[in-house]
Amino acid sequence: MEALDEQIFAALRSAERVVALTGAGVSAESGIPTFRDAMTGMWAKYDPAELATSEAFGRDAERVSRWYDERRCNVAACKPNGGHMALARLEQILGRRRKQFTLITQNVDRLHQAARSRDVIELHGTLWVWRCVRCGTETEERGGAFEVYPPHCSCGGVKRPAVVWFGESLPMAAMRRAQDAAAGCDLFLSLGTSSIVYPAAGLVDVALRNRAMVVEVNAEETPISARAHWSIRGKTGEVLPRIVEGAFGI
Ligand code: BJW
Ligand code: ZN
């Protein structure tokens, strides 16, 4: 991993309003496959267009709900890593200094909450909640696997995971908060996301238009790397603890 620039630490120390946007890469070191990793990504085995859409659920609700429930059960065995911990610590430190910190995630695993981040904006929903397609009732599912696929609501309707599929709108309140935070921040951190899925991928442009500094941490180059003020090639589980430590000490 490359040496970290002292200017990044200084930017984090002096920022008044910080936004962090996280993607699947932040959970990769916890053992959760990313979406687009060519070799090991879960979409090497499954075509996303075939599973992460309401059309797919309409065609084969059993298959889609099994896939999501399998993922829910796998995530239950995973723990937050150094990247999640560093972001929870950053929230605490900035809170104590009366600075604003907004954590926006595209991840559906709730590992930020497991690491004790208190305020997490979930743009793409969560694997843990399932919603009845008939009456809209949402239930949190924490136990073992379901008995039947798809699971059913007491009203007789089928339940689907409360995640955002392609072609669906993002939860309005979450998106509005995310957009406001991006528009008002002076430092935007883009962490472990491929920056290709919209509208989340557009948040960095909102921040840049408002003259925020942008730090990207990603294992690989992305479409926003060239526009970021600093683009760090590395693993968030290793880089983020070093950034927080470099800026604020242990
Ligand atoms: C590491 C690492 C380590 C690895 N450390 N880094 C053109 C313009 C605008 C929009 C569109 C468009 N064409 C189509 C659209 C619409 C579409 C879209 O954006 N498609 C793109 C593919 C082009 N968007 C939508 O449909 C959204 N809705 C919408 O736009 O509504 C309005 C509308 C309605 C009708 C028609 C048109 C518009 C909804 C998007 C919902 C996304 N949902 C998913 C699935 C959630 C449920 C589930 O989990 O199954 O969300 S898709 C998937 O992608 C998931 C993720 O949250 C999201 C983002 O992925 P992410 O997090 O960036 O992960 P990866 O895997 O892509 O990348 C991992 C990165 O980590 C890589 O860069 C690695 O290098 C890196 N990495 N290890 C650091 N250790
Ligand atoms: Zn119902």
Image: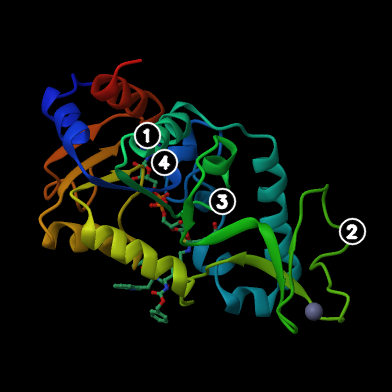
Q: CA distance from mark 2 to mark 1?
A: 46 Å
Q: Residues within 10 Å of mark 2 (few under 14, many from 20)?
A: few
Residue 65 lies in quadrant: bottom right
| Residue contact at pointers 3 and 4, CB within 8 angstroms | no
Q: Dot 1: what SS?
A: helix
Between label 1 and label 3, give the one nearer the viewer.
1
Please say if the residues under marks 2 and 1 sit with CB atoms less than 8 Å apart: no
Q: CA distance from mark 3 to mark 4?
A: 18 Å
Kind of residue indicated by mark 2:
Glu
In the rendered image, residue 238, in percent from the top left (x then y), is placed at: 37, 23
Query: What is the number of the mark on residue 47?
Result: none
Q: Secondary structure at mark 2?
A: loop
Distance between the Cα atoms at labels 2 and 4?
Answer: 32 Å
CA distance for labels 2 and 3: 25 Å
Task: Please tell me which residue is depicted at 36% across the width and 24% down the height of the picture.
Answer: 241
Q: Which residue is mark 4?
A: 25
Q: Is mark 4 within 8 Å of ligand 1?
A: yes
Q: Identify the residue under disc 3.
A: 45
Q: Which residue is mark 1?
A: 96
Q: CA distance from mark 1 to mark 4?
A: 28 Å
